[in-house]
Amino acid sequence: MVVLVKPNAEESELQKIIKQLEKNELELTIMRGIECTAIGLIGDTSQIDAEQLMLNPIIERVMRVQEPYKKASRKFHPDRTIIKAGNAEIGKDKTFTVIAGPCSVESKEQIEEVALSVKNSGAKLMRGGAFKPRTSPYSFQGLELEGLELLKGAREKTGLPIVTEIMSPRMVEIFDRDVDIIQVGARNMQNFDLLKELGKTKKPILLKRGLSSTIEEWLMSAEYILAGGNPNVIFCERGIRTFETYTRNTLDLSAIPAIKKLSHLPVIVDPSHSAGMNWMVEPLSLAAMAVGADGLIVEVHNNPAKALCDGAQSLDMPQFADLMNKLKKMGNSLGINV
Ligand code: PEP
Ligand code: MN
C-alpha cells in the first residue's frame, strides 16, 4: 500500500501518521519528494482501512498495490487446490468434473431415477435442491429436510456424493453432517453470516457468483470462508445480470481464466442458470471446457416438462448422456479426462 501525503503537510502531522501506521507491524519506507511525500507500506495491509485514512486532511491519496484477498490469492499459494468428494478431484490438472441432477428434489423416484441415469452417463456427483431460493414466496420452496433425506437415499443407492444448497446459517450443522459439497447460491454469495459459519467447517463449499457481483467481490466472499479456517472452496460462474434479456443471465466466460489467474481455487460453470434454455446448455458447456473450467454443474430432469422448478433449462436424461459424450470427445482431443 502507498500513502501519499500532501506537500504542505506539517512535519508533526506527518510524524503522527507514521506512528499510527507503525502500530500495524508493517515495514514503512518514507520517500520525501518536492511535490509530495509517499509512505510505502509492506506487509499484511488487509487490516488497514484506506477510506478511514483518507479522513486525515494531510493525506492526498491511498493506493492498494496488492489484492485485499490473501488466502484466495494465487500469489501466496501458487499450487492449485484440489477438492476431493467421492471419486472426484475437482481442480486437478487435465480433469473435468461434471455434477448433474434436478433443480429440486421432488420425490424419491425422481431423484433416484435421475441420479442413477447421470451416474451411468459419467457424472461424478449429483445435485438437487432441497431448500430453494425462489423469487416468489408462492412458488415451490423445496421439500426441505425431507428432500435432504431423499438425497441421502439416492447417495446410498448410487454412491454419488451430494451437492445441495444451504440458505440459512442455522442449517450449517445438519449440512456439515449430511452433505458432501454445500452450495451457496447466487443470492447468498454475500450473506456474510452464512459464509462465516461455513468457514468454521471443513466441508467443500460451492460458491456461486452473485447475480451482479464483480470478480473481486466474489473472491472476497471466498476469503470469508477461507479466513474462518475452511480452505475448501470451489467457485461457480452461473451467469450475471446484464442488459441482455434473451438469455436468463449472461455467462461470463472470461471469469474462468480470470479466476484461474487470480486464485488457486477451482472454478466450474453452471450453463443451465446462465442460459435459462435447455438447447443452449451444450454449446455453453463445451465453451466452459475450452476456456479451462474445472467442470460443470448441470440441471437434468426425468421429465423437464413437469419439473417443479427450472424445467425449461433442464436437460432430459438422453440429452445429458449426449452432452457427456460430446464433452468426452472434446476432452479426448485436449487431453482432458471427463
Ligand atoms: C440452483 O442451483 O438451483 C440455483 C438456484 O442457482 P443460482 O443460485 O445460481 O441461481
Ligand atoms: Mn435451478
Image (tube, grey):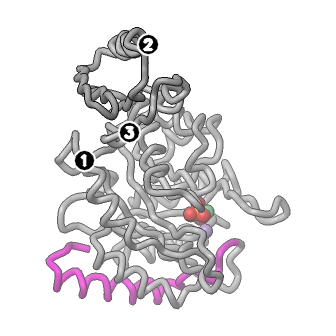
* Amino acid at dot 1: Arg
Residue appearing at x 53%, y 76% in the figure: 250
Asked which secondary structure carries label 2, the reply is: helix
Q: Is residue 246 above or below residue 296?
A: below
Residue 150 picture location, percent across and down:
59, 57
- Magenta-colored span: 309-338
Pair 3/2: label in front: 2
Contact between marks 2 and 1 (CB within 8 A): the answer is no
Q: Residues within 10 Å of mark 3 (few under 14, many from 20)?
A: few
Residue 264 at x, y percent in the picture: 26, 50
Residue type at tag 3: Met
Q: Are marks 3 and 2 in contact (CB under 8 Å)?
A: no
> Mark 3, mark 1: which one is toward the viewer?
3
For badge 2, the amino acid type reads Glu
Is 217 a magenta residue? no
Mark 3 and mark 2: span between their CA atoms? 20 Å
Q: Pointer 2: what residue? A: 13
Q: Which residue occupies the foreground of this view, 93 or 73? A: 73
Occupied quadrant, residue 28: top left
Apparent side of residue 185 relative to residue 115 in the rendered image (left or right)? right
Q: CA distance from mark 2 to mark 1?
A: 38 Å
- In the displayed structure, 99 sits above or below 52; it is below
The residues tagged by marks 3 and 1 sit, at their Cα atoms, a distance apart of 21 Å
Q: Under 8 Å from ligand 1: the CB of mark 1? A: no
User: Where residue 74 is drawn, which disc sits there?
Assistant: 1
Q: Quadrant of the N terminus?
A: top left
Find numbered disc 3 in the image and state the secondary structure of the residue it sits on.
strand
**Residue contact at pointers 3 and 1, CB within 8 angstroms:** no
Q: Label for residue 63?
A: 3
Q: Nearer the viewer, residue 172 or 113?
A: 172
Visible residue check, residue 103: yes
Q: Earlier in the sequence, mark 3 or mark 1?
A: 3
